[in-house]
Amino acid sequence: MIYGFLFVLPPVIGFAVFGLFPALYSIYGAFTDWDGLGRMDFIGLANFRDIFQDEQFFKAAYNTFFLMIGIPIGLALALLLALALNRGIPGTTTFRVIYYIPVISSLAAISILWSWAYNGDFGLVNQFLELLGIEGPNWLSDKTTVKPALILMMVWKNLGYTMLLYLAALQSVPKDYYEAAQIDGASSFQSLWRITWPMLKPVTFFIVVTNIIGGSQIFTEINIMTPTGGPEYSSATIVFYVWQKAFGNLQMGYASAMAVILGLFIFVVTLIQFRMNERTSRDY
Amino acid sequence: MKARKRLTDTLIFLLLLSGAVFMIAPLLWMLSTSLKTREAVFALPPQWIPDPFVFVKYREIWEKGPLLSGIRNSVIVSVTVTVVGAFTSSLAAFSFAKLRFPGKNAIFLMLLGSIMIPYPVIMIPQFLMFSHVGWVDTLLPLIVPGLFGNVLMIFFLRQYLVSVPETIIEAAKIDGTSYFGLFSRIVFPLMSPAVAAQIILWFMGLWNDYLAPIIYLNSPEKLTLQLVIANFNANYAIQTDYPLIMAASVVALLPMLIVFLIFQRRIIESVVISGVKG
């Protein structure tokens, strides 16, 4: 069927031109001294060698992974909220919508908002802390507080999404499981631990993996809230550094090498997810 | 027993309520700041209800930055890509779901694999490609790739179509319709709820995009909305004109918020389905 083939041609072309070709070019570029202006000589593993001696790269990598601490925090809070919402109290739909509003809000606008919220003297966060009698720091200018500040913002922004996924998963647990457990005399804590949690494992895994992949590519928040990469480069992420090197310093070979390392990391994480998915579906 | 449930339910309601307040408070505070004068922002103790309550910043934002062109550019990108991209994606999904051709599964798997390629890996070569053809500082690099279709959308539409019975297709084939006619007159209308949901999500993603625009766009009149407000922040924070910055951000947030509130049931459904499938 010629038509079948024709109809899928656009995405295939799109993939080839805008996906595959740039990806391969990037991988090649990682082994050159590419400067985006014409020079592109093969230099072997030199970029990679330099990266592993680059303090800024390690700082950026450390920051990127530190920020992932928000993942389990967000997970726990979202699960708590989902369990609460699952009880079917009045106002469930409204709550769902309210919790989801930060999720659909533009990251740029949210970053700007929280930049102001973290203002040392007049920001919302310190206003709130003052009510509790605590004097808040200048969150984004202090290298010990800038990452926790970012984590809080990111947890806030994504809570609704994670909660939604958990709520759907909770609602798909057959009610008879709980009834049977109750007949057998299980406490609600035991039900939670023995029935609910195992049934939530697939969704939890999905959330963790997608958050790791997303978290490893954080850029916008850093660029807007700490445009220089934070005090002593304590908030710059890998993608932020890649962007600086590629478009700021025109060291595109070097930047590509970092991007390739990042890509490899994400590839491995995704592979793990695929394998785990297959394993869990086989269990059923 | 019932009283105990009532008590737990009330506690839970309070928990959810405080959570909801935590979610909304920053946004309300943003709104409140936008309605203040520049000086009122620094009042101590801080006020939640602006006094004086002014709209002046909402007038100033149109003059103090390329806000209008920002909106226009964002609309151009988002609308063009979603309209054309939805068409190419649904056509491809139809083909993957219902038509037969050699290598279909291999091609589908290959396209799925493209999801695993993160944008940072391709952004540098893409930039050089586009600068070769002189498209830097135009909206084209943001539009053209999307026109070829969206793999996630293709994936979901294909899943959706698989449940459409073959009989309808067979009947149309017997009638002698062309495959394209089959698509446009029968299959596409059947898919339209799924397509609509995907379009909304895609549109929102494009509207909120920041990384790609910041790479390609430089001239003020070319910037998309998200870049415009980021510049507002960068330029006016030093002047501590926070009401201005917040007003611009509110204007940037509002369209998608409205879209979300109108379509929230569909959007939430889509999100849940994709999460469950993943």
Image: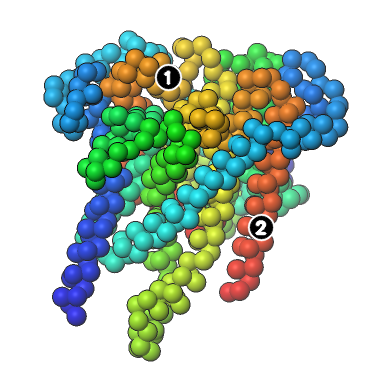
Which is more foreground, mark 1 or mark 2?
Answer: 1
Residue A238 in picture, x, y percent from top left: 61, 36
Q: Do labels 1 and 2 share a chain?
A: no
- Side of A35 relative to A41 (left or right): left
- When the figure is inspected, residue B189 is found, relative to residue A179, above or below; the finding is above
The residue depicted at 67 percent of the width and 34 percent of the height is: A55
Label 1's element? helix
Residue receiving disc 1: B234
The residue depicted at 18 percent of the width and 69 percent of the height is: B7
Residue B16 in picture, x, y percent from top left: 27, 56
Residue B158 in picture, x, y percent from top left: 57, 51
Label 2's element? helix
Residue A12 in picture, x, y percent from top left: 69, 38
| Chain to which the residue tagged by mark 1 belongs | B
The residue depicted at 40 percent of the width and 66 percent of the height is: A170
Q: Is residue B253 visible?
A: no
Residue receiving disc 2: A272
Residue sitting nearer the eye, A105 or B171 = A105
- Side of A45 relative to A100 (left or right): right
- Side of A158 relative to A256 (left or right): left
**Badge 2: how crowded within 10 Å, few (<14), some, or many (20+)?**
few
